[in-house]
Amino acid sequence: MCYICVTQNRTSDMDDFIAARSQMALSLGFHIIFSCIGMVMPFFMAVSHYKWLKTNNEVYKNLTKAWSKGVAIFFATGAVSGTMLSFELGLLWPKFMDHAGPIFGMPFSLEGTAFFIEAIALGFFLYGWNKLNKWFHWFTGMVVGVSGLASGILVVAANAWMNSPAGFDFANGQYLNIDPIQAMFNKAWFSQALHMCLAAFTATGFAVAGVHALMILRDRNREFHLKAFKIAAVFACIGALLQPLSGDISAKDVAKRQPAKLAAMEALYKSEKPAPLLIGGIVNEQDKTVSGAIKIPGALSFLAHGDFGAEVKGLDQIPENEHPPVAVTHYAFQVMVGIGTLLMLIALVYFFNLVKKRSLLEQPWLLKLFVMAIPLGYIALEAGWVVTEVGRQPWIIYGIMRTKDAVTPMPGIAYSFYIFSAIYFSLSIIVTFLLYRQIKMVPVLYAKTESK
């Protein structure tokens, strides 16, 4: 819904259009981090809780309680940012919602149901200590994770529909024969949902593991933070190793449905057979050239079609008024793949050390790698969404409705952008403060059972 360059007749229209795109981009950029943490952290919490029930080790109980506070913080923040997003869809893109709402309303309705289940289960978990059966209490924590994950998948299904419209017939500007089930389970939903879920586990796992690794390096409550580090690191590393497989599925899917997006991802201005995969490179959109890139012969053909000699469709076979912004899409794709490769290498090193049964505490360099990776997963996550959204342009509904035709005609959207920016900035400060205080309180609240 953002990052598209178009020409409007009036400067004010252009300003409002840019403001609408910027507001949506900012809102999605913030919400995706909160929602991913909310999707993944309950599973960390459930594993720690299970270990406490099986071993009766108080450190695991304290870790579960500490993580549950973080889950509550991000649940509240995600609820606020998600509610704001739902209002923004109607405020900024009324024409889009007027046409598309009846078609893909089902996943949004089901997402609301999943959200309420998550909220109820979280309430049971937070206030159920010493009040509920211990295994039922653990089960409520699992429900928090499963319902949060389902909520994320349902939202992604709605976004996938924008990339792969289905479940209706479009004739004379009308949407006929609507099938909401087919719309929800469109051709893009599985690849996007799989890629998004793995990205959420990878990014959140490395961030959480990195924070606990930092505490270990500082010699703070080692047993507590080491147990937390191991749980988060395993999730992160498994996600990082599986991510290339989901990326391959996504690339082949995009090659079939959105060849313009794939061409923009690789800055492929001319169709090639076989097509090389570019690593890096500076894009010149005026001359339609790429300089300084490393080329891997035939790799793009294999990535897109599973055949090193296959032809890959370039932007020369696509009308110019349907080209995505190539530079932004290409750079974002390079960032996503580059960081993903780095995290995969860290995962391999981590599992190698586990197999060799080497003490992580004796290898500060490995812990420092995880500290370095704290922000990297979320940078890759944001870059991936830039590829998804920018690469779809100039369409808000691919091949059906252009983004410029969906924006609200209401003037003064710039003021809305400033207000929402201030709200999200305030939320980020509040969340950072709460998390910092939570980490500082670990020695006081959650590590009393450790030996001094």
Image: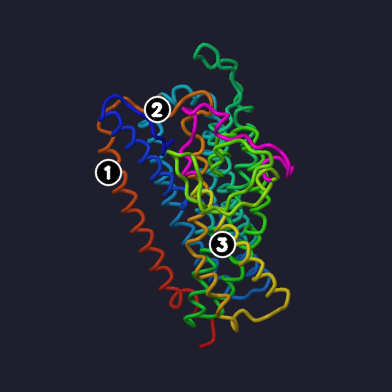
Question: Mark 3 or mark 1, which is nearer the start of the sequence?
Answer: 3
- Residue 20, quarter of the rendered image: top left
Residue 310 within the segment the image draws in magenta: yes
Secondary element at tag 1 = helix
Give the residue at mark 3.
Answer: 205
Q: Residue at x 66, y 59 (%)?
A: 241
Horizontal placement of 9 versus 21: left or right?
left
- Disc 2 residue crowd, few under 14, some 14–19, many 20+, Cα 10 Å: many
Query: Tag 2: residue type?
Result: Lys
Comparing marks 2 and 1, which lies closer to the viewer?
A: 2
Secondary element at tag 2 = helix
Which disc number belongs to residue 404? Answer: 2
Query: Tag 1: residue type?
Result: Tyr
Extreme residue toward the bottom, this view = 452
- Measured Cα–Cα span from mark 2 to mark 3: 38 Å
User: Which one is in front, 30 or 446?
Assistant: 30
User: Which one is in front, 392 or 105?
Assistant: 392
User: Which one is in front, 327 or 414?
Assistant: 327
Secondary element at tag 3 = helix
User: Which one is in front, 388 or 123?
Assistant: 388
Image position of 83 with respect to 39: above or below? above
Comparing marks 2 and 3, which lies closer to the viewer?
A: 2
Which disc number belongs to residue 207? Answer: none
Residue 110 seen by the camera: no
- Residue 360, quarter of the rendered image: bottom right
Query: Tag 3: residue type?
Result: Gly
- Measured Cα–Cα span from mark 2 to mark 1: 21 Å
Residues in magenta, as a range:
303-329
